[in-house]
Image (cartoon, helix red, strand yellow):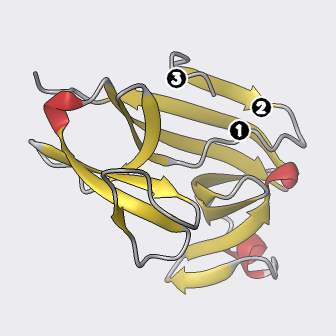
Amino acid sequence: MSPDAPEKADAPEGTEALTPPGTYAVWEGEEYPARGVTATTVVLTKPGAGDPPPGFERSVTPGIAGTRIVPRDSLDRLYTVTATGRWRGEPFDILGSDGSSAWSSYTGRDVEWALRQPELQRTDLGTFQGLLPVHELTGIHEVVTELAVVR
């Protein structure tokens, strides 16, 4: 997704172009997943394996090569991505994605329907979540929300 695009609505069925929902920071011209956002600092993460980039500390978290804490006012951009879509005609919030699968939470009201779906797990009373194939999601709607970069 282009960092300048405010949203991407109704991605075609079968797409794998879903941006994983979360918070992102652009620092020194490079985009990073961001965690630990406070009023003054942001934790940048470098996904992958192997050696972290210069200035990043090696991470013990699987799938994260390194992390780096930077001042929030040094960022070029800070934003969040949220996404919704439909699976088998029912509405879902998309909580995370690796590009081919999406961890999703059912937002519909048909509990009987949700109980009949083996891909969904009941996580709480009336709450169902599951790992769904991105190519089976329709009507994907991503929203990008800009967060203030304090200067």
Quadrant location of the N terminus? top right
State the CA–CA distance, disc 2 to disc 1: 5 Å
Q: Is residue 88 visible?
A: yes
Camera-side residue of 51 and 99: 51
Which of disc 3 and disc 2 is earlier in sequence?
Answer: 3
Q: Which amino acid does the dot numbered 1 rest on?
A: Ile
Look at mark 2 in the image and give the residue it sits on: 11
Taking the image as shown, residue 46 lies to the left or right of residue 96, namely left
The image position of residue 149, as x and y in percent, is: 20, 27
- For label 2, the SS is strand
The image position of residue 93, as x and y in percent, is: 58, 53
Taking the image as shown, residue 139 lies to the left or right of residue 52, namely right
Q: Is residue 4 above or below residue 23?
A: above
- For label 3, the SS is loop
Q: Which mark is residue 102?
A: none
Q: Which mark is residue 140?
A: 1
State the CA–CA distance, disc 3 to disc 1: 18 Å
Q: Which mark is residue 3?
A: 3
Camera-side residue of 148 and 59: 59
Camera-side residue of 93 and 32: 32
Q: Are marks 2 and 1 in contact (CB under 8 Å)?
A: yes
- Mark 1 Cα shell of 10 Å, populated few (<14), some (14-19), many (≥20): many
- Mark 3 Cα shell of 10 Å, populated few (<14), some (14-19), many (≥20): few
